[in-house]
Image (tube, helix red, strand yellow):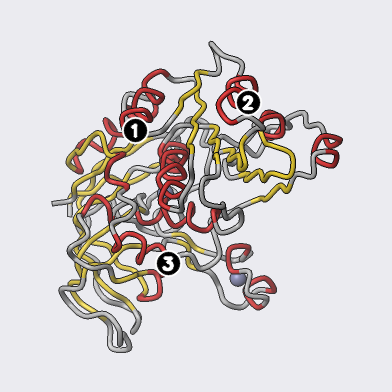
Amino acid sequence: MHVPIFKGEGVLSYEARPVPRLDAPDDVLVRIEACGICGTDLNILAVPPAHKATPGIIIGHEGVGLVERVGASVRDLKPGDRVVVAPRLTCGRCAYCRRGLDNQCTDYQTIGTTRDGAFAPYLLAPARALFRIDPRVPRDDAALFEPLSCVVGAVRRAPIQPGDAVLIIGGGPMGLLFAQTYRAMGAGQILIADVSPYRLAFARAIGVDLTVDVRAEDLRQAVHDATGLGADVVVDAVGNQLGTAIGCARRGGQVVLFGLRPHDLPAVSQYAITRHDLTVHGAFVGLHPFAQTIRLLESRRVQPSALVTHRLPLAELAEGVRLMREQQAIKVIIEAE
Ligand SMILES: [Zn+2]
Ligand SMILES: [Zn+2]
């Protein structure tokens, strides 16, 4: 395989690597069709890095492909099956895993971060990291399984009622997946706030009801004008917008904190949370959202491929990263074959 290797400090260099061989009995070899570029990949490749990854590995965790070979103990997958990747390999032994809170595992590995990922023609993964998906789901919908699973995990924390107004702060790929998912759940109004005219125009093009350019408009005022009382649910897909979100939620409403910005310390009115009876949810990657996400994709009620603006070959991974980083793309799919 001629594959991009992460060398640290933002460097990708192409090297020849052998096609991985089955090693453990539960190993599965997957011939990758495509892999999405994630915000996490941009963070891994930032200088200095904003997300840890092990130098020397192949990155990429939003993979879809076909099972090529399975190890001796694999029972539920067979060659030819279409599979998607759930990249986080939890330990099953730590105190959180034993409490059923696998998303808080303290000893996990991640495909594409600590071990070889899916920006490659082949991926070796344990069977438990792979989920079979109906081959009739288009490739690029299946490729967005992993980010959609994080959104499915989060919306379960803040379910909506039919007709509810949902404000999403941050109109990147994750914000747009929230828009699609809450729409499928029966939202009456979807509003998206961002600073990027490109993202806001894209959001309107895929059917978001109202977009707000927060550099030009007062978001709180715009949300109250559009909804009357404020949004029933506000999602912060940025990671430092809690203060703003509180001001945009109606009394008795919910706020979902989804974006991750570990070093930011936003100013927040605790008084408003109490006085307005708000419920604030932290939502991290979701707890076993995978089977539900497969069914959602197979239902075709959510079609995340609408977010794909570019498809590039493996040799142009760095160009795809650049397009997303400079916000000239919403979602880039790397084609492995
Ligand atoms: Zn991802
Ligand atoms: Zn664990």
Q: Which residue is mark 3?
A: 292
Please name the residue shown 63% across and 74% down the image.
100
**Above or below: residue 215 compared with residue 331:** above
Q: Secondary structure at mark 3?
A: helix
- Viewer-side residue, 2 vs 280: 280
Classed neighbour count for the residue bearing mark 3: other residues with Cα under 10 Å, few (<14), some (14–19), many (≥20): few
Q: Position of residue 236 (x, y in %)?
A: 59, 38
Camera-nearest label, 3 or 2: 2
Q: Secondary structure at mark 2?
A: helix
- Viewer-side residue, 220 vs 322: 220
Classed neighbour count for the residue bearing mark 1: other residues with Cα under 10 Å, few (<14), some (14–19), many (≥20): many
* Residue 224 image label: 2
- Viewer-side residue, 40 vs 232: 232
Q: Position of residue 274 (x, y in %)?
A: 84, 42
On the image, which quarter does residue 155 sit in?
bottom right
**Above or below: residue 159 compared with residue 25:** above
Please name the residue shown 24% across and 43% down the image.
14
Q: Which residue is mark 1?
A: 330
Mark 3 vs 2: CB contact within 8 A:
no
What amino acid type is highlighted by mark number 2?
Answer: His
